[in-house]
């Protein structure tokens, strides 16, 4: 399966990586590497994570306090956000990948 990011999810990832990099050199790269590893897990087994109200699934990052909500549509995995666990909860729910 192919993995696609919504444009807003790309922005989420970049913003978080830049923030981490500003706190400690190399930390932003570690964050993006972790997100990449999580994406590989989704691509290998997209159905592993339960479907939640609203039809999306979610996978947590193991070290950083972020998660990736995603939809499975045909042969694609669509990532809606790279969301912090404790900030702006659910802000990504209005992003249009639910069709």
Image (tube, helix red, strand yellow):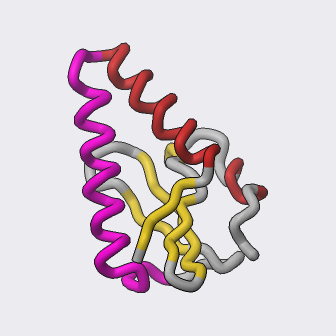
Q: Position of residue 55 (x, y in %)?
A: 65, 79
Is 24 rendered above or below residue 70? above
- Image quarter of the N terminus: bottom left
- Give me the residue at 35% from left, 72% from top: 43
Is 81 rendered above or below residue 55? above
Q: Quadrant of residue 69?
A: bottom right
Relative to the observer, which residue lies in front, 48 or 79?
79
Range of the magenta residues?
A: 24-50
Left or right of residue 73, residue 31 in this image: left
- Give me the residue at 25% from left, 27% from top: 27
- Give me the residue at 33% from left, 20% from top: 21
Q: Position of residue 81 (x, y in %)?
A: 57, 52
- Give me the residue at 55% from left, 66% from top: 78
Give the overall secondary structure of the magenta segment.
helix
Q: Position of residue 86 (x, y in %)?
A: 54, 43
Is-magenta flag for residue 34? Answer: yes
- Image quarter of the C terminus: bottom right
């Amino acid at each position: 399966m192919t993995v696609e990011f919504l444009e807003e999810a790309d922005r989420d990832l970049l913003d978080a990586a830049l923030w981490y990099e500003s706190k400690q050199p190399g930390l932003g790269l570690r964050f993006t590497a972790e997100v990449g590893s999580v994406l590989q897990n989704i691509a290998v087994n997209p159905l592993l994570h339960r479907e939640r109200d609203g039809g999306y699934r979610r996978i947590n990052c193991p070290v950083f306090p972020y998660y990736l909500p995603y939809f499975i549509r045909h042969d694609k995995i669509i990532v809606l956000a790279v969301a912090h666990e404790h900030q702006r909860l659910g802000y990504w729910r209005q992003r249009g990948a639910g069709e």
